Image: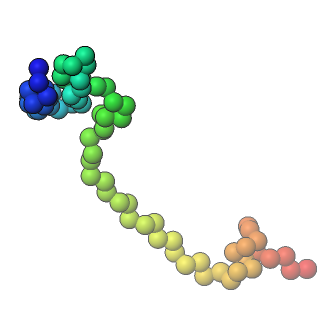
């Protein structure tokens, strides 16, 4: 097989089986098409994502002393 014939065959195989990787190589003066299993070639199907709305927190009407010393507020002695 010539190089041009191997390239044509590679294109045909890639169209009929797009899940695999096809390469052309020369071996002992002859050209051939080989199927190569490359790691990471199969990717998961991409899906759309929906961003969640932020969780609003109500303003706390207590002053900082009461908020920072739970559960009953600051010690008054």
In the picture shown, does residue 34 fall above or below 4?
A: above
Question: How many badges with numbers are in the image?
Answer: 0
Task: Residue lying at the far right in this picture: please name it.
Answer: 77
Q: Is residue 32 visible?
A: no
**Residue 10: horizontal and vertical position, in percent?**
14, 29
**Residue 74: horizontal and vertical position, in percent?**
80, 76
Of 18 and 60, nearer the camera is 18
How was the colour assigned to the protein in this rendering? rainbow
Of 14 and 63, nearer the camera is 14
Asked where in the image residue 51 lies, by quadrant, the reply is bottom left
Q: Is residue 49 visible?
A: yes
Of 52 and 35, nearer the camera is 35
**Residue 66: horizontal and vertical position, in percent?**
72, 77
Residue at 36% of width from left, 35% of height from top? 40
In the picture shown, does residue 15 fall above or below 27?
A: below
Residue at 76% of width from left, 75% of height from top? 73
Asked where in the image residue 62 lies, by quadrant, the reply is bottom right
- The quarter in which the C terminus is drawn is bottom right
Residue 32 in the figure: left or right of residue 40: left
Residue at 11% of width from left, 24% of height from top? 2
Residue at 43% of width from left, 66% of height from top? 54
Of 33 and 35, nearer the camera is 33
Residue 35 in the figure: left or right of residue 17: right
Asked where in the image residue 64 lies, by quadrant, the reply is bottom right
Task: Residue lying at the far front in this picture: please name it.
Answer: 29
In the picture shown, does residue 54 fall above or below 20?
A: below
**Residue 48: horizontal and vertical position, in percent?**
27, 52
- The quarter in which the N terminus is drawn is top left
């Amino acid at each position: 097989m010539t190089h041009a014939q191997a390239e044509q065959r590679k294109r045909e195989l890639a169209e009929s089986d797009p899940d695999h990787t096809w390469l052309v190589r020369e071996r002992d003066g002859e050209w051939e098409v080989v199927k190569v299993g490359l790691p990471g070639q199969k990717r998961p199907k991409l899906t759309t994502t929906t961003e969640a709305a932020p969780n609003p927190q109500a303003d706390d009407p207590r002053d900082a002393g009461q908020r920072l010393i739970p559960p009953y507020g600051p010690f008054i002695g």
